[in-house]
Amino acid sequence: MSRGKFITLEGGEGVGKTTNLAFIKNYLEQHDIAVVVTREPGGTALAEKIRQLLLDNKSEAISEQAELLMMFAARAQHIKHVIEPALTHGKWVLCDRFTDATYAYQGGGRNMKISTIKWLENLVQGPLRPDLTLLLDAPVEIGIARVRERGAFDRFESEKISFFENVRRAYLLQAELYPERIKLIKANQPLPDVQSAITDVLRTLLGLCSLNCPTSTRHGTVK
Ligand code: T5A
């Protein structure tokens, strides 16, 4: 049995990751691919408890180091109990956020050392990296306005705009560093257009692309 593929969805607050997760799952299942949908922080009972602690905006102040280590503690559980077993059994894993979020939020947002994040990434993940990352990108104020409509803010959503600008910059830097893996999708367009751009990327991944495929799908930004 061949190993499954690992796909991650990334982007700032309210860019549409959760909305598009169901669309991608459906698309892959239409192509007879067994998909496990999961998220970070979270994905196992213990990791979901860590998520609650991380998102709770009424807890004691969490230090930056504690936050970083909690992200990787949750990730270690998630990889061992969900991601690796699924990939080994030939299933594809579709994950709402993964380690690019750590580079963006803890690296860009909290200004933690990239070398420390990289060290933890290697420790916790070994060689595991996503096969494909869809980075949904939109101006910060658009994502925040979408989240605001939903009501109460969690601990991260309560951060200042400058924090999210730094997160966005760090995500875009990741996309520049790993253009083969990370495909940038413009998320400040109507949902059908976002999903059409996502479909183009998935078609390439599935080898369904013919000469009609947009060249941009093969080299970074889509649309
Ligand atoms: N975190 C996570 C770290 O700091 N480090 C890490 O290593 C990891 C893994 C997790 C938090 O943890 C942090 C980052 C996060 O702050 P989360 O719930 O996963 O939290 O992340 P959020 O970004 O908070 O999730 P959201 O649900 O807020 O954002 P989504 O999933 O991107 O947005 P979604 O799909 O819920 O859409 C928001 C609204 O916009 C609408 C939707 O209908 C919805 O109402 N929408 C659109 N409207 C118009 N046009 C479009 N194209 C639209 N797409 C979606």
Image (spheres, rainbow, N blue to C red):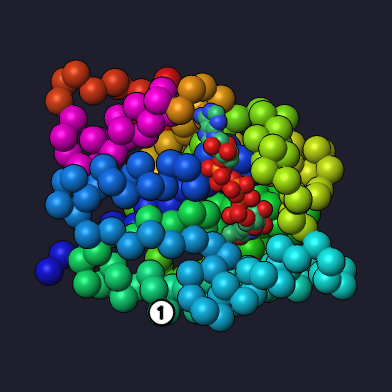
Q: Amino acid at mark 1?
A: His
Pick the residue in front: 112 or 151.
151
- Residue of label 1: 81
Residue name at image x 24 percent, y 64 percent: 91
Quarter of the figure with residue 183: top left
Q: Is residue 114 left or right of residue 204?
A: right
Side of 49 relative to 175 (left or right): right
State the image quarter where residue 121 is shown. Answer: bottom right
In the image, taking residue 114 as reference, residue 210 lies left or right, namely left
Q: Position of residue 46 (x, y in %)?
A: 56, 81
Magenta segment, prevailing SS (helix, strand or loop): helix
Q: Is residue 170 left or right of residue 64?
A: left
Residue found 43% across the figure and 52% down from its top: 8
Q: Check the image and report above or below for 23 versus 137.
A: below
Quadrant of the frame with the C terminus: top left
Image position of 30 with respect to 55: above or below: above
Asked if residue 148 can be seen in this view, the reply is yes
Is residue 178 visible from the viewing direction of this image? no
Secondary element under disc 1, as helix, strand or loop, is: helix
The magenta stretch is: 192-209
The answer to whether mark 1 is within 8 Å of ligand 1 is: no
Name the residue nearer the viewer: 158 or 165: 158
Q: Where, quadrant-wise, is the N terminus in this rendering? A: bottom left
Expressed as whole percent of the image width and height from the top left, the position of residue 159 reads 81, 48
Q: Residue furthest right?
A: 60
Query: Is residue 202 shown in magenta?
Result: yes
- The x and y percentages for residue 116 are 67, 65
Which corner quadrant of the image does residue 143 belong to?
Answer: top right
Residue displayed at 60% across by 30% down: 138
Q: Position of residue 128 (x, y in %)?
A: 40, 65
Give neighbour class at mark 1: few <14, some 14-19, many 20+ (Cα, 10 Å): few
- The residue lying toward the viewer, choosing from 191 and 134, is 191
